[in-house]
Image (spheres, rainbow, N blue to C red):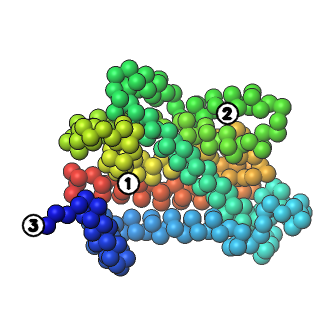
């Protein structure tokens, strides 16, 4: 039997992987159990379609919105508090009416939803990176490192996420007290939300890492001298990402709601860069004076967005649960 070197075997494997057509890999996705589980649930399909529509409307707001609510040259205070088109004294230019500054409410919802989604995505990514890193280190290293990280997590779990976000926002306000807060409001909000949600990722990844590190492939990697950081990043991390994806999907909805709550309380996005929570806060001042549409329509948009994302998160949690297969 002729001798075959490791380099030749590796090259043959890479050639075989590269020779597989892209259509074959795409076909595997459509033939997977996860995709068929998705198609079997009509509620999940409807939620996915609704989420995709809302995402497109928000991120394509500069092109699909009837007006630009940030263009001061096109905003007139004379158009303030105009009711929706189906009510008396309406204006056909403003389908859902206007707010107290004369901004088209439909356009403001599109732009505000985009800000809410960007804050939600950025905070979830930041929380996931922090939580996954600490969870991997705690689960793999164990001992005092694990004890310190988990005690910090336990202390943070005793406080509600909204309280932690308010605390961080207050600290940031004290640090940047002499600077215009609107400049840093976006970044402060992301940091506040990220530091509020990292614990869930850390605890989940730690538990999965403690299981994975005792398996044979990790022990074999240790024997041949692979550094610990490489083992955690290349070998353990891919095997613990399933639960993380579920947490990230559900936390996206929580981050959007928390951001809306902070903005409603006046410590989130400023009125000059309104998110859905800011629009609801603005409309709340006019809710009892008859201009109900200023608060109701942004509130409905927020509820619809969070509902669709939550439905997708619930499906993903059930689909990735081996006990329910």
Q: Residue at horizontal 69%, vertical 46%?
A: 186
Where 72 sits versus 188, above or below? below
Q: Residues within 10 Å of mark 1 (few under 14, many from 20)?
A: some
First reached walking from the N terminus: tag 1 or tag 2: 2
Is residue 261 among what the camera can see? no
Indicate left or right for 157 with 257 as reference: left
Q: Which residue is mark 2?
A: 169
| Tally of numbered discs | 3
Residue 280 at x, y percent in the picture: 68, 50
Whole-Å distance between the Cαs marked 1 and 2? 31 Å
Q: Which residue is mark 1?
A: 314
Is residue 8 among what the camera can see? yes
Whole-Å distance between the Cαs marked 1 and 3? 55 Å
Q: Secondary structure at mark 1?
A: helix
**Which mark is on residue 1?**
3
Give residue 27's quadrant in the image: bottom left
Residue 315 at x, y percent in the picture: 36, 58
Where 81 sits versus 191, above or below? below
């Amino acid at each position: 039997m002729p001798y075959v070197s490791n380099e030749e075997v590796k090259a043959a494997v890479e050639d075989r992987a590269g020779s597989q057509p892209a259509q074959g890999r795409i076909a595997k996705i459509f033939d997977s159990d996860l995709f068929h589980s998705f198609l079997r649930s009509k509620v999940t399909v409807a939620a996915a379609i609704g989420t995709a529509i809302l995402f497109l409307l928000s991120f394509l707001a500069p092109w699909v919105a009837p007006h630009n609510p940030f263009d001061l040259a096109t905003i007139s205070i004379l158009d303030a508090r105009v009711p929706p088109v189906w009510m008396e004294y309406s204006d056909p230019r403003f389908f859902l009416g206007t707010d107290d500054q004369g901004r088209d409410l439909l356009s403001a919802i599109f732009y505000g939803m985009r800000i809410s989604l960007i804050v939600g995505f950025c905070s979830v990514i930041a929380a996931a990176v922090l939580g996954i890193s600490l969870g991997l280190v705690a689960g793999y290293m164990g001992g005092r490192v694990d004890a310190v990280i988990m005690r910090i997590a336990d202390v943070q779990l005793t406080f509600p996420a909204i309280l932690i976000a308010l605390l961080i926002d207050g600290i940031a306000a004290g640090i940047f007290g002499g600077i215009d807060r609107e400049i840093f409001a976006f970044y402060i909000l992301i940091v506040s939300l990220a530091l509020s949600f990292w614990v869930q990722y850390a605890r989940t990844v730690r538990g999965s890492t403690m299981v994975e590190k005792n398996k044979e492939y990790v022990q074999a990697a240790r024997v041949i001298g692979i550094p610990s950081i490489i083992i955690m990043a290349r070998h353990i991390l891919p095997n613990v990402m399933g639960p993380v994806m579920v947490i990230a999907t559900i936390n996206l909805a929580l981050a959007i709601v928390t951001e809306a709550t902070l903005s409603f309380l006046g410590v989130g996005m400023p009125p000059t860069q309104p998110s859905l929570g800011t629009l609801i806060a603005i409309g709340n001042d006019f809710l009892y004076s008859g201009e109900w549409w200023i608060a109701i329509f942004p509130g409905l948009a927020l509820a619809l967005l969070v509902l669709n994302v939550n439905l997708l998160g619930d499906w993903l949690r059930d689909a990735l649960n081996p006990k329910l297969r």
